[in-house]
Amino acid sequence: MTNRDWVQRDLSVLWHPCTQMKDHERLPLIPIRRGQGVWLEDFEGQRYLDAISSWWVNLFGHANPRINARVTAQLDELEHVLLAGFSHAPAIELAERLVGITPAGLSRVFFADNGSAAVEVALKMSFHYWRNRGQTKKTKFISLANSYHGETLGALAVGDVALYKETYRPLLMEVISVASPDCYAREAGESCADYSRRRFAEMEATLARYADEACAVIVEPLVQCAGNMRMYDPVYLKMLREACDRHGVHLIADEIAVGFGRTGTLFACEQAGISPDFMCLSKGLTGGYLPLAVVMTTDDTFDAFYDDYASLRAFLHSHSYTGNPLGCAAGLATLDIFAEDDVLGSNRRLARAMAAATAELTDHPHVAEVRQTGMILAIEMVRDKATKEPYDWRERRGLRVYRHALKEGVLLRPLGNVIYFMPPYVITEEQIHTLARVAREGIDLATRD
Ligand code: PMP
């Protein structure tokens, strides 16, 4: 079977995510036969360097022997059991270890099976907490402009990426939106920290105004990933934590994309020295192997639900695959790698290599900014460098970069006009240089006319 055979069969039965299927009349679909380390290989032996960790999930490479071994062993023991009334060792061990490595105070672990589901859980838990505490006027959520929290209706409602949200607006709950602290719009000469601090004024005013009605503020700490990899300073999180406490509003940290070392620290919240009331984790939680998610929260939250059955205060949310043992085993193997290897130290070297390899792009006539937080590096292509006028989205310039990269054996998947690297941590410095070269060529091609 060749690539063509698989593509033909695929296109007659599959409906792909995040895709206008008609694009595949011209755009090649790439069937993958196997993965190894940073590489994905198709059915004809062509390899692609997975520079985006297959949608930001993969941490330690495809087919990692250490994760493979643990998942395989788990498969022989127990593939799945419901987590209501029953439990299993991988879920217990993973929960214990997560409590040990996440910010202080996050002492309870509620499992789900994907990122959007974790966001739904956190939103419902926060709302339900206030209700159980007799605060029934608290029904609203506050979120940041340009944020992304998933595609299910609750998660979509608290997100703000128009491309995904606009069509479904009539179905979505009203959310209070506050300007993003994202530093792209800072004044010339203004530091990112000063800009993020200045932006906090609107959040402070919103919290003061809605304190009685707001359940929680939900944020992606430090990087708004799906919102074009926009970045902000930790000072904003510090101020937000303090203000949420002062106004009696929960703080939900959606670390689904930024958790597990992506921003330079194990969790992004650490850079602000804060503990949220709820932390959502998924993606890297299993090293990119299996769908699994958790919402971590405090004793205070847990206690608000703990009562006699007849009080009807319990949190009855459930998904069939909650806490799947294979996913938990992959999670445990992933945490073992963090414990045994100096992952964050090695990532610091890789992050420096990414910065050095892309430094010259800062001077490119159609690049407005090269920005980086740890292992996430983004390059913003613009029509006009001086005014930062963007290219019209209909021109699909990012797609030209995508196509060029594929020809060169690299999987880059720009977000609109933003090209980014978010590679598995097993990438080498030499491979980083390849990425930078391919990105630069792609940007040259895409901005030629
Ligand atoms: N929150 C954030 C910050 C994300 O980046 C994503 C996924 N890109 C999600 C939530 C949703 O996760 P999932 O795709 O597993 O539903």
Image (spheres, helix red, strand yellow):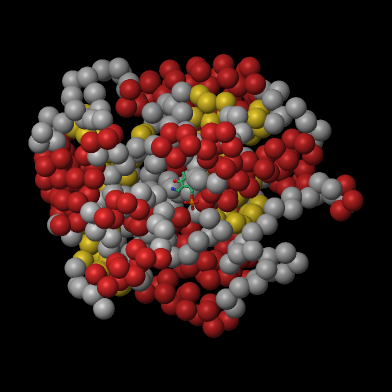
Please tell me in which quadrant of the rendered image residue 448 appears: top left
Residue 121 as seen in the image, left or right of residue 435: right
Rendered residue at 44%/65% (across/down)? 289
Query: Nearest the camera: 346 or 61?
Result: 61
Residue 200 to residue 416: above or below: above
Rendered residue at 24%/58% (across/down)? 28
Rendered residue at 58%/54% (across/down)? 294
Residue 424 as seen in the image, left or right of residue 86: left
Query: Nearest the camera: 145 or 191?
Result: 145
Query: Nearest the camera: 33 or 276?
Result: 33
Does the rendering let one see residue 214? yes
Count of numbered labels shown in the rendering: 0
Residue 80 as seen in the image, left or right of residue 355: right
Q: Position of residue 94 (x, y in %)?
A: 57, 63
Query: Nearest the camera: 173 or 170?
Result: 170
Residue 327 as seen in the image, left or right of residue 14: right
Q: Position of residue 135 (x, y in %)?
A: 78, 30
Please tell me in which quadrant of the rendered image residue 186 appears: top left
Give the position of the C terminus as an image quadrant: top left
Rendered residue at 38%/21% (across/down)? 195
Residue 74 to residue 27: above or below: below
Please tell me in which quadrant of the rendered image residue 372 appears: top left
Q: Position of residue 415 (x, y in %)?
A: 31, 42
Does the rendering let one see residue 337? no
Give the position of the N terminus as an image quadrant: bottom left
Residue 236 to residue 337: above or below: above
Q: Position of residue 77 (x, y in %)?
A: 58, 81
